[in-house]
Amino acid sequence: MKKALMMSFAIVAALSGETIDEAFNEGKASGQLRITYVNQDNAVDIDTYGTSLGGQLKYETGRSNNVKLGIAAYISQKIGYATGDEEEGKANHDLFAANAKSYAYIGEGYIDYSANDFSLRVGRQLIDTPLADTDDIRMHRNSFEAAIATYSGIDKTTLVGGYITRWAGYDSGDDITHFKKLDTADSHGAAIVGILNESVENLAVQGWYYGIDNVSNILYTDATYMISVNELIDAQFSGQYGYFAEKKSSDVDGSVYGIAGTFNIGMVSLGAAYNKTINDNGKTIVNGFGGGPYFTSMEEMSIGSMEDAKAYQLSGELDLASIGIKGLMFSALYGNFKSAPADLNVKEIDLIAAYQISEAFSAEMSYAMIGDKNKNRLNDGIHDYDGGYDYFLLRMSYNF
């Protein structure tokens, strides 16, 4: 990371005043306006809800001497009358900073160098890899402090490498606006190396290594094969494997396997997926830094942090583009998650509607029903409780 920072400083220092002026004159501002409402109806605990109006404002300079600069502010303003009272425990914190407060922070701020088939970006940025990703599921995406290099000079192959030090966002834990270390085990960061290849027709393969300091060494790979029968019918088959090797007693250790298949017939898609983890006693795999790559992941549930987990998912999707309603899609998913060591058996049903009204404007709704009928024991050590809940999200976004 230090070497990458020194390189970026050298790049900026090499620019003359004239070229910097030129870059700013060719700069471009963009942004997104977003309003989001969430409601969690708990089986036992107090129900919570929240509403936020916000989005992001971004400015990126033009490219000069192969260099450009970018910065983006992420903003979430609580709408008080449409958000539960914090003192009564009714405020949903998913859209806000600590104590259900509004927030504004610099989510992106980077130096980007690109020449021919090579690019290097240093600073706060968006990253999408299997075990470190943006996971845009609430007000803002996860973003990372990192140095990431990409090379695409090999035919149908992309090489990625870099180092991540900190991250912020919904998945990062308490106070989503604060850039924090990658893990509570006081990790200093993660080295990542990846290769993506599509040299075989209809086959996409990727392989990744993540060396997370004081946590785990991780190997991950997946492959997807497409089969097209005719203009109306096609199928997709996927497989994945991940290996986690524990470091510093982090308890992140084990293996995960997954298979998935999707059949598309006209406007209808039907899918099925299965995941299994194998762990020693007390060990688990993790989602990484984001939503995770697992085929059975749902709106709420995932096999991440489960010991000896088994999960399957059934899904159906309806795309109305073929009958003239372009951009409107409906999805329904059913998932079942089990962990024998934890005596866990959770079912989830997701109903999702998404409408891309125009290039600028989109709306989406999701309703997740989590059925947890396990014997969850209260602190009194005697009584059980139902840990299930329903989660509703409505989000509208306008890009400019």
Image (spheres, helix red, strand yellow):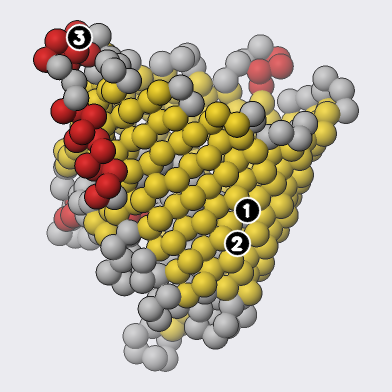
Give the mark nearest the N terminus, 1 or 3.
Answer: 3
Q: Secondary structure at mark 1?
A: strand
Identify the residue under disc 3.
Answer: 22
Of tags 3 and 2, the one toward the viewer is 3
Q: Nearer the viewer, residue 6 or 220?
A: 6
Query: At label 3, which amino acid type do we have?
Result: Glu
Identify the residue under disc 1.
Answer: 221
Q: Relative to 172, is 137 on the left or the right?
A: right
Q: Quadrant of residue 78?
A: top left
Residue 242 is marked as 2
Which percent across, then down, holds residue 155?
Answer: 64, 29
Q: Secondary structure at mark 3?
A: helix
Which quarter of the image is occupied by the C terminus? top left
Look at 40% across and 70% down and name the residue there. Answer: 215
Q: Quadrant of residue 195?
A: top right
Mark 2 vs 1: CB contact within 8 A: yes
Q: Relative to 374, is 142 on the left or the right?
A: left
Residue at the extreme left: 17
Look at 36% across and 51% down and name the residue there. Answer: 163
Near mark 3 (Cα within 10 A), the count class, few <14, some 14-19 or many ≥20, is some
